[in-house]
Image (cartoon, helix red, strand yellow):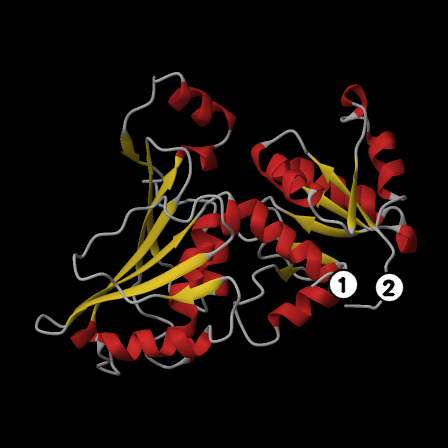
């Protein structure tokens, strides 16, 4: 907190999209923030966007990658008068000079976000995967070069306008795997920020539900050099996220089931370790709302930190 009561101003470039709408709704209930907008007929006018950027404290980019880069160039053209930026696209998640906006990822990350001029908002899938993997790499329980596989399922709201329209028109399948060319756009940030030196295999899927997400990582415990037990993995996760307001490590239910929609409408992230010691196997699972901690909720968390409101 910076001790002042001045209302902060935010411009959402791309406010009509799913993520932009979610951010606007959250900020509308925030007493310390006013959201500025451009008239609909001028939203693609570079001069109109540059003008409003010069008048606000922070700009949120909810745009395709190429358009996000153009908006950053507009902000940079303002020099010292330019706003701080949160980019919700994938354009800058591995770029030098940008802070990765996952405050719970590592010690000091929240402070890095607070002081940053440029913050890249994490992808929904990487948020769950990084939360499961990075603490274990840092604890020495999972080698950085381990051949990691990440499986995930998301509600269709994360797939963009065409996917949303297809599911709501009932023309899409009930369930499908995708990204089977093994080139999903979230892979670079997942590998970098999870601290993996070997490129993981990532298999995403989508189901016939609007929002909600499960991300899972299977492990053969006996094959790991440290020979950990499932309880060791859980302990490392609990230690890493101790005191976190939004990320929690939960004890798995005995029934061995988990559905993806329980956190919908929240900005929380839950982590679980399912283990079978007799077979020396474990499955790490993250559950989140892909529109909450996986998108709009994460952006607002970063906005609050950057504007001294948290």
Between label 1 and label 2, give the one nearer the viewer.
2
Which secondary structure lies at badge 2? loop
Residue 40 is left or right of residue 172, and the answer is: right
Determine the residue positioned at 8% across, 73% down: 278
Residue 305 is left or right of residue 48, and the answer is: left
Callouts 1 and 2 close, C-beta under 8 Å: yes
Q: Is residue 136 above or below residue 54?
A: below
Q: Is residue 86 above or below residue 66?
A: below
202 vs 280, nearest the viewer = 280
Residue 116 falls in which quadrant of the image? Answer: bottom right
Pick whichever of labels 1 and 2 is earlier in the sequence.
2
131 vs 147, nearest the viewer = 131
Which secondary structure lies at badge 1? loop
Q: Is residue 39 above or below residue 129?
A: above
Q: Is residue 223 above or below residue 130?
A: below
Whole-Å distance between the Cαs marked 1 and 2? 9 Å
Q: Residue furthest left?
A: 278
Judging by the rendered image, the residue that carries numbered circle 1 is 308
User: Horizontal and vertical percent for residue 84?
Assistant: 78, 54
User: Horizontal and vertical percent for residue 149?
Assistant: 29, 57
Determine the residue positioned at 21% across, 81% down: 227
Determine the residue positioned at 31% across, 62% down: 148
Residue 255 is left or right of residue 291, and the answer is: left
Residue 223 is left or right of residue 71, and the answer is: left
Judging by the rendered image, the residue that carries numbered circle 2 is 4
């Amino acid at each position: 907190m910076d001790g002042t009561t001045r209302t902060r101003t935010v411009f959402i470039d791309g406010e009509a999209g799913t993520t932009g709408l979610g951010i606007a709704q959250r900020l509308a209930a925030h007493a310390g923030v006013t959201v500025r907008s451009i008239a609909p007929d001028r939203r693609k006018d570079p001069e109109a966007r540059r003008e409003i950027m010069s008048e606000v404290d922070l700009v949120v980019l909810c745009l395709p990658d190429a358009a996000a880069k153009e908006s950053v160039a507009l902000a940079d053209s303002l020099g010292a008068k330019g706003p701080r930026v949160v980019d919700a696209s994938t354009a800058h998640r591995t770029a030098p000079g940008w802070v990765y906006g996952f405050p719970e990822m590592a010690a000091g990350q929240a402070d890095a976000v607070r002081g940053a001029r440029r913050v890249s908002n994490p992808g929904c899938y990487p948020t769950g995967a990084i939360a499961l993997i990075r603490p274990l790499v840092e604890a020495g329980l999972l080698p950085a070069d381990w051949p990691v596989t990440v499986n995930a399922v998301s509600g269709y709201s994360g797939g963009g306008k065409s996917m949303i329209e297809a599911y709501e028109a009932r023309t899409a399948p009930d369930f499908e795997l995708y990204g089977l060319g093994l080139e999903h756009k979230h892979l670079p940030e997942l590998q970098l920020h999870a601290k993996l030196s070997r490129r993981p295999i990532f298999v995403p899927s989508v189901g016939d539900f609007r929002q909600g997400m499960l991300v899972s990582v299977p492990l053969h415990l006996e094959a790991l050099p440290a020979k950990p037990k499932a309880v060791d993995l859980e302990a490392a996760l609990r230690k890493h996220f101790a005191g976190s307001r939004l990320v929690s490590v939960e004890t798995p239910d005995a029934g061995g089931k988990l559905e993806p929609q329980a956190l919908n409408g929240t900005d929380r992230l839950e982590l679980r370790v399912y283990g079978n010691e007799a077979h020396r196997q474990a499955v790490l699972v993250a559950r989140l709302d892909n529109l909450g901690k996986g998108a709009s909720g994460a952006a607002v968390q970063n906005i609050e930190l950057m504007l001294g409101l948290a």
